[in-house]
Amino acid sequence: MTQDTRTRMLEKTATLLQHRGYYGTSLSDILSASAAPRGSLYFHFPGGKDQLVIEATRAAAELATGELRHLLDTMERPAAAVRAYAEGAAHLMRETDFTFGCPVAPVILDAAGNVPELAELCRATIEGWQELMRDAFARAGLAPHRTAPLALLAVAAIEGALIIARANRDATPLEAVGAELEAMIEAAFEWDLSGSRST
Amino acid sequence: MTQDTRTRMLEKTATLLQHRGYYGTSLSDILSASAAPRGSLYFHFPGGKDQLVIEATRAAAELATGELRHLLDTMERPAAAVRAYAEGAAHLMRETDFTFGCPVAPVILDAAGNVPELAELCRATIEGWQELMRDAFARAGLAPHRTAPLALLAVAAIEGALIIARANRDATPLEAVGAELEAMIEAAFEWDLSGSRST
């Protein structure tokens, strides 16, 4: 029972953060969404709102990271895995009436609430996604100098597409960016773009 | 003098929105940053905070749109203009100690503060950037079915790179994404990626 309240508070906090950001997520919002009495905040999270926000962000980021890792590990082509990740996000946006979003982008754009540990968590999460893609591209045989730029482009484009989809209340841009990234990553395996530029 | 206070309030509001989002930008922050007395809000903006935020967002969005249009109109290759736009943003981030950012993304991720006019302004701004790129790509002779996907990818990737640069307090990712987009857009002019996929 106690555990349930704690888990519910973490989940609702993550949802609120994705939908309204760090500053848009008040303690009253969290308690009301979790149907939790005010005393439960410091009982479950002695560090207060910052601890709750950090733990909620970490849990939501780990879900996203786990999903990306799973797709890259189990699908034959990393390009298809990147597209599948974008399509999974599109599906979640539709399912949640477009409140789902990146677990770290809204926090980053709120200057991480001026909480250094939260800022570092967000930075490391985005770095981790790029690392997963770089490693998968390398395992699949992509030229070493192409893995980092393509991983950065893919993470950036998916982050941006989540914003565009939210703005339009339409997940199609996320699917379109997924398709475009798949084609571009596939093409990078076939020829070296930066090589072709220097000719 | 009166005009000065109004302009200063708009500029400071835009800066705060980019750095901390809609909910992170309080009236006290705005008045304090603008060195404006409390009475000046309703004197200059009878519609209150929402009017101020809408006008500030519109003005900052028009600056960004004007810069993108200028680059696409004056540079010979649209691919180079897209890269120059990303590099200009990287320069502004460094100049402002990484408080500069997209004028609409933080507002979008704050659910546009639940203000429909603000949500529509953000949506239309992002659509406008894509339209400028689509038109420039078309004028330069890109195959019609490639203009929209590439414009969407470019806007999404720059939006995402702004977030990654902010998270790292390092504008290098923005420059790297600009270089990558330039190469990919150039490549699209040389061959049709989606055509190559279907072979």
Image (spheres, coloured by chain):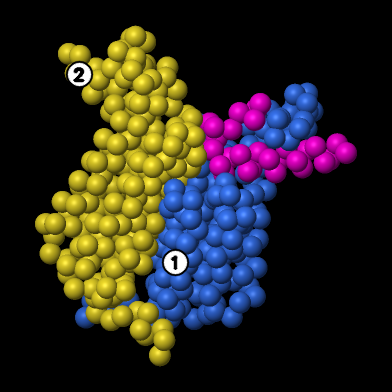
Chain colours: A blue, B yellow
Residue at screen point 47% across, 29% down: B24
The C terminus of chain A: image quadrant: bottom left
* Residue to which mark 1 is pinned: A176
Tell me residue B190's x, y (percent).
24, 79
* Residue to which mark 2 is pinned: B4
Tell me residue B123's x, y (percent).
38, 47
Where, by quadrant of the figure, is residue B79 drawn? bottom left
The secondary element bearing badge 1 is classed as helix
Q: Viewer-nearest of labels 2 and 1?
A: 1
The subunit letter for the residue under badge 1 reads A
- Stretch in magenta: A1-29
Q: Which of A50 and B26 is in front in this view?
A: B26
Tell me residue A127's x, y (percent).
51, 55
Task: Judge left or right: residue A154 versus residue B40.
Answer: right
Q: Which of A199 and B26 is in front in this view?
A: B26
Q: Which of B17 and A143 is in front in this view?
A: B17
Amino acid type at mark 1: Ala
Main secondary structure along the magenta-highlighted residues: helix
Amino acid type at mark 2: Asp
Q: Residues within 10 Å of mark 2 (few under 14, many from 20)?
A: few
